[in-house]
Image (spheres, rainbow, N blue to C red):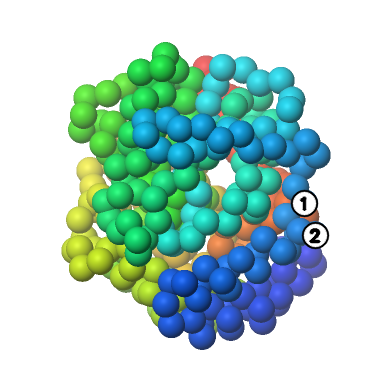
Amino acid sequence: MPSWRSKALNKLLFRVMRSRLARCEDVYSLRRALAELERLGNYILPPPGLECIPDRIGGVSCDWVTTGQPASDAVILYCHGGGFCIRTPESHSAMLARLGEMSQARALMVDYRLAPEFPFPAAVHDCFAVYQDLLKQGCKPERIVLAGDSAGGNLVLTTLMQVRDAGLAMPLAAVLLSPATDMTINGESAFLLRHDDPFFDLGTLLLMRNAYLNGHHPCDPLVSPIYTDMAGMPPMMIHVGALEILQDDSVRLASRLRRAQCSVDLTVWPGMPHVFPLFYQLPEAQEALARTAAFIRFQLQS
């Protein structure tokens, strides 16, 4: 059963976020509305000692996210969500710093270029460029874990596709939180849960999608990685909320990975909204991050 805190958050998100986002007519108004997410500090609970250290890797702006605790040489390469159009650095940095500390790994967030100023394929190229440069700098692929949420989960998958197709060494594993894998948005959950999702309505998703695609075909695998061959993908852990319009993006992805004989651990969390691990006050978020950190540590030790 969902916790009382998650039920309270869902009501708050539905009343404050979804209703406000549904009234937005362009990406710029969406950015102003989603800035409110950064003010939910009581739910996000940034960890003590949180620090973001700017860097430039592969020509792309990035941030090393840390709490100042000792870490190994392992790297969590993180692609943030935001519909390819929006950046919410405080909420994502808080979650990533905590995940890095729990995993005893260095955490690196990619500040990829955003649409509509830089539509597809800018973000796809940026994330791949960062991975390539980490390898050139001497980071061992077996010590790199790719992770991302929502649109960032999409970019994790497209990065893996490019790594595989370029004949480069795959990273050790991948973690996806509520990934957006099908830009056609035709999963069954998009219809069945369109009135129940506490965060997004279909109109908001289509607004961000169209800004990102800029007329590009949504079935291109570099846009919708659900349509690619999953052979050769590394072990993955996927978390998704049962109230999400995008729930089927995760369920279908896990099915395709299993059919390709890839290792995948999927959890559909009852009563949870989109990318709920951002909200660390929720006991479900704490459990999801603890399980994710355990997955990363296990992969690193295998």
User: Which residue sits at x=73%, y=33%?
Assistant: 67
Residue 101 rendering spot, x and y as whole percentages: 69, 31
Disc 1 packing (10 Å; few <14; some 14–19; many ≥20): some
Per the rendering, the mark at residue 42 is 2
Q: Residue at x 67, y 81 (%)?
A: 15
> Which of the numbered marks, if any, corresponds to residue 7?
none
**Alpha-carbon distance for marks 2 and 1?**
6 Å
Amino acid at circle 2: Asn
Asked if residue 36 can be seen in this view, the reply is yes
Q: Secondary structure at mark 1?
A: loop
Indicate the amino acid at tag 1: Leu
Of the pair 215 and 7, the residue shown nearer to us: 215
Q: Position of residue 143 (x, y in %)?
A: 49, 20
**Does residue 283 appear in the picture of this structure?**
no
- Say which of 230 and 121 sits in front: 121
Q: Position of residue 245 (x, y in %)?
A: 47, 70
Look at the picture and state if 110 lies above or below 87: above
Residue 134 shown left or right of residue 288 in the figure: left
Q: Describe residue 183's horizontal placement relative to residue 36 as left or right.
A: left
Residue matched to label 1:
45
Crowdedness near tag 2: few (<14), some (14–19) or many (≥20) residues, C-alpha within 10 Å: few
Along the horizontal axis of the image, is 168 left or right of 70?
left
Q: Residue 99 location in percent, x, y?
A: 65, 37
Is 145 above or below relative to 140? below
Decide if residue 196 is on the left or right side of residue 114.
right
Give yes or no for contact between labels 2 and 1 (Cβ–Cβ under 8 Å): yes
Q: Dot 2 lies on which element?
A: helix
Residue beneath the point at 32% across and 56% down: 118
Q: Looking at the image, is 52 positioned above or below residue 19?
A: above
| Nearest the eye: 188 or 173 | 173
